[in-house]
Image (cartoon, rainbow, N blue to C red):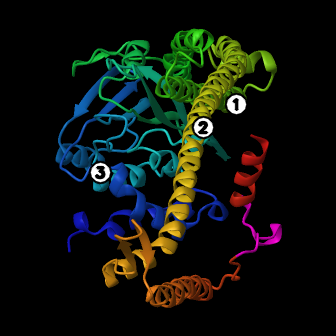
Amino acid sequence: MTVDNDPVQIWRPYLQQLPSHHDPSSVNLANLEDQFLNGVPRVLTRKNETHVRVTDVYDDHRATKLHTNSKSLQNFLTTESAIPDGLNIRIVSIYSPAAIAPLEVTPLSMALLLERYAVHPSFIQVLLSFGRNVHISEAGNGLLCVNERDNDTYVSYQLNYVEKTGRRLIPWSWRHTGVYHHRRQPSQNEKGYDFFILLHPNEDSISDKRILNGLGIFEDSRLQPGLSRNEARDQSILVHSLVLSSFICNWRWYLRYLGDRFEEYNDRALVDLPDESTPLESYRTVSELRNLNDFALRAHVCCRGNLDLVSALKPVIASSLRRRTLDSAGQALPGCEALLLALQGYIKSCEELIPRMRNAIDLAGYTLSLHNQLETARVDRELRDLTSSLKRLQEDNMNDSAAVKVITFVSAIYLPGSFIVSLYGMNFFVFDEDLRQIVIAKDFWVFLATWIPLTLITGLIYVLIVWFDAWWKRKPFRFFQRPRKEDMSEPEMQVGKEFASE
């Protein structure tokens, strides 16, 4: 397996040299190696794609070069001097084709870059946050880390923000930009310099263009006039100001977008009537308001994170410039005070917007709940009507059942006699022509002797059938006895009470 294909061999040279350049107590090599092996496949491209710009500011000239080939970048990192003579500022800008896409640099090129400039391990946390959108659990975390050692100052952080896109459904996208700054203070035997690594979420980054314009560099390979050391020092600090000011002001327009969307759904929630709006419409209103509330909460957290980042970054920059007073600290980061005031205003706007969104959510939720109550009442009325209809039907069935019982009982009395009469052919009555009347035959007793026992036997068989049915169903046998209340079920008792009341 070659070095290009072995992740362990790619990152091990950088990891092995860390204790010699940085505080060994702050370097956990095993943890860093595990993070590289697990996180890098998502963060860095697996293809042979490269989009890295190297911008240099020397004493006598300024230049920028875009590397679009991994071989070209690796050759630059391995053959040329890390800090050439006369270099004041070097900015390595690494781009991503989209906020959720990997950075366009191969793992080997990135490992060479980290090893070549002995990048502080705190920057690894910023690097591994790329390749995906801003994580919801890290929206307020700027990952700011500052480390000072001898004449070196290391600063790394991540700026979370929103940026407008051309999409129609959601015209704003969450993005982040990573910054790494290593400042080497000048000494008697060595000239100082500033080294930057900038991670951009897209190839057309506004901050990248502003930095090039701020440094007075054109996007071509021609040489341009250089800067003095004092000018270069101020320009290096300008990089932080340009990165922060490029995106922090976007919060104003994003919050206005949320406010416009909120007014639309808030007006709808105010005019919706429970008996006119459908449950689906009320649910959509509640859902959209909850989404807007989540966006506002996330913006609030991000603005607080940006405020903490700028507040903490100001004294760090002043310290790296050897400025200790408050006035000099404010001058160290141009535009810092304006950004702090703007962020405080954005936070207050969020604090005003979030409670109003929650009130609108409650109102829309009450409307949906009241609609459900009205719907339940309507169903209850329909059930009551259905119950009344079933009650009348039950009464009719009971009346029909009683009539059938009477008919059955009468039939049980007459049917045996009819059977016997049919059996004996009506020969028990004789018409006497002399007396001119019907005379009972002498054998009429045979009819009675047959009919009465047969009727009794039929009744006995019926009683036995009823008794057997009660025994089989494990019910008490009551033929001529009214059932007691404790033996009746609740539905039977309720029906009895309703009949009694009527």
Q: Which of the numbered marks, if any, corresponds to residue 142?
A: 2
Q: Which residue is mark 3?
A: 109
Q: Which residue is mark 1?
A: 308
Q: Quadrant of residue 357?
A: top right
The stretch of residues the image draws in magenta is: 480-490
The answer to whether marks 1 and 2 mark residues whose Cβ atoms lie closer than 8 Å is yes
* Identity of the residue drawn at 27% across and 51% down: 106
Magenta-colored stretch includes residue 143: no
Left or right placement of residue 356 versus residue 65 in this view: right
Distance from label 1 to label 3 (Cα)? Answer: 33 Å
Q: Which of the numbered marks, if any, corresponds to residue 73?
A: none
Left or right placement of residue 197 versus residue 363 in this view: left
User: Which amino acid, by three-letter code, is at mark 1?
Assistant: Asp
Q: Quadrant of residue 320?
A: top right
User: Which amino acid, by three-letter code, is at mark 2?
Assistant: Gly
Left or right placement of residue 353 versus residue 294 in this view: right
Along the viewing direction, whichever of 6 and 226 lies nearer the viewer: 6
Q: Main secondary structure of the magenta part?
A: loop
Choose mark 2 or mark 3, whichever is in front: 2
Q: Compared to 7, does 474 lie above or below?
A: below
